[in-house]
Image (tube, rainbow, N blue to C red):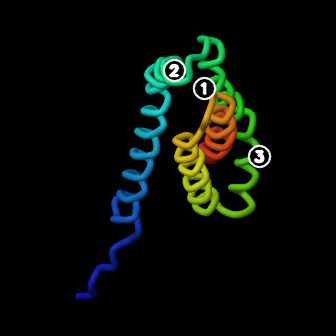
Amino acid sequence: MAARMREPGPDQAKGWLIAMACFFINFIMAGLARTAGVLYVALIELYGVSREAATTPFSIRVCVRNMTGPLIGLLGQKYGVRAVTTVGGFVAALGSILCYFAPNVIWITAFWGIIHGKWIVFPT
């Protein structure tokens, strides 16, 4: 009786690892979108700026994220989704960390809106 070879399929360990990674990415992305209200109030209180100035980093982040989607998609096709997602995660984290050192809302807009917003796109 010949031993049956197990055929590759979606229910192997690698498939579950990818599913969990997608879950965490979506969990973090939804969490970032939902914290905008809390961060908005914190910017007003910390920097003493108007509501319009406090909302700029979040608006720029969404615009930059949506506008750079095609570019990040092309990079994903050229260099691979895994490489682009990994680099994007590190650069986005760097943008978030730099916000801690920002002296005013203009720098928050640069770090959160542009650096974080550009690289948080995950190509599909």
| Image location of residue 2, percent across then percent down | 27, 87
Other-residue count near label 2 (Cα within 10 Å), few / some / many at <14 / 14–19 / ≥20:
some
Split into 4 quadrants, where in the image is the N terminus? bottom left
State the SS at label 1. helix
Is label 2 in a helix, a strand or a loop? helix
| Callout 2 touching callout 1 (CB < 8 Å) | yes
Q: Residue at x 61, y 59 (%)?
A: 87
The image shows residue 113, relative to residue 51, as above or below, that is below
The correct choice, above or below, for 54 with respect to 99 in the image is above
The tag earlier along the polypeptide, 3 or 2, is: 2
Q: Name the disc covering residue 71, or none.
A: 3
Label 3 amino acid? Leu
Residue displayed at 48% across by 18% down: 45
Q: Camera-side residue: 58 or 19?
A: 58
Disc 1 and disc 3: Cα gap in Å? Answer: 21 Å
Give the residue at the far bottom of this rendering: 1
Q: Is residue 81 above or below residue 68?
A: below
Q: Which mark is residue 122?
A: none
Residue 72 position, x and y percent, is 71, 48
Tag on residue 58? 1
Crowdedness near tag 1: few (<14), some (14–19) or many (≥20) residues, C-alpha within 10 Å: many
